[in-house]
Image (cartoon, grey):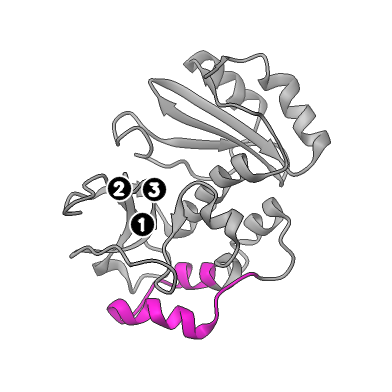
Amino acid sequence: MDNKVYDVIKELFGIAGTKGFSEEEIEQVRSLHGEIPFALELYYREVGRDELVNHTQNCLVVPWKYSWPKSESHLIFYTENQCVCFWGVSLDDLGMEDPPVYVTFDHKDRRAWEPESGSLSDFLITMAHIHAAFALPYSIEDIYMISEEEAGIVRRNFREKCKPLMRWYNGGEESGAEVYGNHPCDSIVLMRNDDYDMFYASGKEANFDEMNAILSSLGQEY
């Protein structure tokens, strides 16, 4: 995989250089099962220590900061903020460079896993965009509820920025998250919840005003 795959996250959040973990810290993850996918290792090195990227809404799991969630079948590396669900990589896939990601809503035994994303890097980029829509300086104050027709307006006016999630966040049923925007530091998130929840933000005021001119007329605030 491209070593610059996470540069889109750096540009989104305005990160210069790297904000990653040390080799000793990464080794603590590797020691859990003997190896970790390169996509996760690279992410730890490039942006793993940035709080806005990794802890604005949900949480990147790191063994030196949290008690590591256990699973008999998966390496759990990300959690929903209230532990409603956990994301992991199958232990059978740890030797892959950029393996698929699975989600479990079984927060007690963590035995039932469903496909979430086709690759670990895609998942991490999409989650960064979700966090950006809350964390970037120019943003809406509330989440908007929009219809399928209004979601079509978003899709026609803005380009898809990353791969959608398949299952999160409505309990794994009729769920998923899509991300749109026309500039590197923009993030418009659509999350299916009966219809759609929409929230958006930008790192630049002019870009936000451009988005808002189209999006502010859609839906209603919660």
**Amino acid type at mark 2:** Pro
Residue 191 position, x and y percent, is 46, 31
Label whose residue precedes the other's in the sequence (3 or 1) = 3
Place residue 92 in its image quadrant: bottom left
Residue 119 position, x and y percent, is 42, 56
User: Is there CB contact under 8 Å for labels 1 and 2?
Assistant: yes
Tag 3 residue: 80
Kindly report the distance in space between the C-alpha atoms of the residues bearing marks 3 and 1.
18 Å
Tag 2 residue: 115
Q: How crowded is mark 3: few (under 14 residues within 10 Å), some or many (20 or more)?
A: some
Report the magenta residues as a range.
19-44
Kindly report the distance in space between the C-alpha atoms of the residues bearing marks 1 and 2.
8 Å
**Amino acid type at mark 1:** Pro
Label whose residue precedes the other's in the sequence (3 or 2) = 3
Q: What element carries label 2?
A: strand
Residue 128 position, x and y percent, is 56, 51
**Amino acid type at mark 3:** Glu
Q: Residue at x 35, y 32 (%)?
A: 170
Which residue is situated farthest in the bottom direction here?
Answer: 24
**Above or below, 75 relative to 222:** below
Residue 217 located within the stretch drawn in magenta? no
User: Is there CB contact under 8 Å for labels 3 and 1?
Assistant: no
Label whose residue precedes the other's in the sequence (1 or 2) = 1
Q: Nearer the viewer, residue 167 or 13?
A: 13
Tag nearer the camera, 3 or 1? 3
Tag 1 residue: 100
